Image (cartoon, helix red, strand yellow):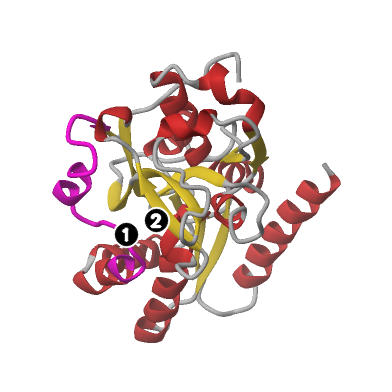
Amino acid sequence: MLIRSCVCLCVLLTITVAAFSGAPHPVVVFAGSASQPPLEEAVKVFQAKTGTSVILHLGGSGTMLNQIRLTGQGDLYIPGSPDYMEKARGFGLVDGSSSIIAYLIPALIVAKGNPLHINSLEDLQRTGLRIGIADPNGVCVGLYAVEILEANAITDKIRDNLRGMVESCSKTAAMIPLNMVDVVLGWREFASWNPEAMDIVLLDPGQIPRLAYIPVSMLRNAENPKGAEAFVAFLESEEGQAIFQKHGYLTDENAARKFAPMANIGGTYTLPESW
């Protein structure tokens, strides 16, 4: 609790100092770390092109949402799936429509070369296999992992193998390089973050009930709406989309659908009480 309070206080102090420094108010972004590598690059390019400063806060989508609610600050919210954007809308923090920046595909992430020959969702049932997922109560990819396990009636068969329940996408992706687990039920895009250490095992298309997308919306209390609009326009531009593509993300819905033609895109999922 102390650590979380300190983090939130630091966020508030950062925004407050920027607001009273005499400089133009920066664009303050709260984002789920599912989009961390391309967003960090996009911020650098945007700042260099426009001279507009961007303060980028990254973490679990639920944690970022809580910081917005606590501080009452921020210009843009970019969670890792529409589930948390709907929560933000329910709290009255955003209004209007959301833009879609990129798409996310559920997949298994294994160590480079797949030394344990994990080739399917069914292989997660092996005795003693260490499976990593994110905390489904605060991280989008954890919620999608649970949805897949439940949809395929495999939860009870693999529950003893579950490890981690970490609090962000960045920490979930790091579980493989750090040898904390043998396999991660995460996003296909994780493997592009560290291709020397990770490989992708795609799921059977029929086992994926839902594909995700990364939405962006302006916050109701945005202090720099013009700057926020300009940053969103950059993310949607050919140059901004190319940054996401460079990092292995899909920016076209038809390309995403090829991984699971019958899956829904977007929508929300309610975590079962058993989790």
Q: Residue at x 85, y 47 (%)?
A: 2
Along the line of sight, the residue nearer the viewer: 171 or 117: 117
Q: Amino acid at mark 1?
A: Tyr
State the separation of the CA atoms marked 2 and 1: 6 Å
Residue 49 screen position, x and y as percent: 34, 84
Which segment is the magenta one?
A: 244-264
Q: Which residue is mark 1?
A: 249
Along the line of sight, the residue nearer the viewer: 9 or 57: 57
Task: Give the number of marks.
Answer: 2
Is 245 rendered above or below residue 85? below
Residue 36 screen position, x and y as percent: 48, 62
Q: Is residue 168 magenta?
A: no
Q: Is residue 136 left or right of residue 105?
A: right
Q: Earlier in the sequence, mark 2 or mark 1?
A: 2
Q: Which numbered tag is attached to residue 67?
A: none
Q: Residue at x 49, y 28 (%)?
A: 146
Q: Is residue 256 left or right of residue 269?
A: left
Task: Classify the position of the N terminus by image quarter.
Answer: top right
Q: Is residue 246 magenta?
A: yes
Badge 1 marks a residue whose secondary structure is: loop
Q: Which residue is mark 2?
A: 189
Is 151 rendered above or below residue 184? above
Answer whether labels 2 and 1 touch (C-beta < 8 Å): yes
Q: Amino acid at mark 2?
A: Glu
Is 32 rendered above or below residue 194? above
**Residue 225 in view (yes/no):** yes
Badge 2 marks a residue whose secondary structure is: loop
Mark 2 Cα within 10 Å, few/some/many (few <14, many 20+)? Answer: many
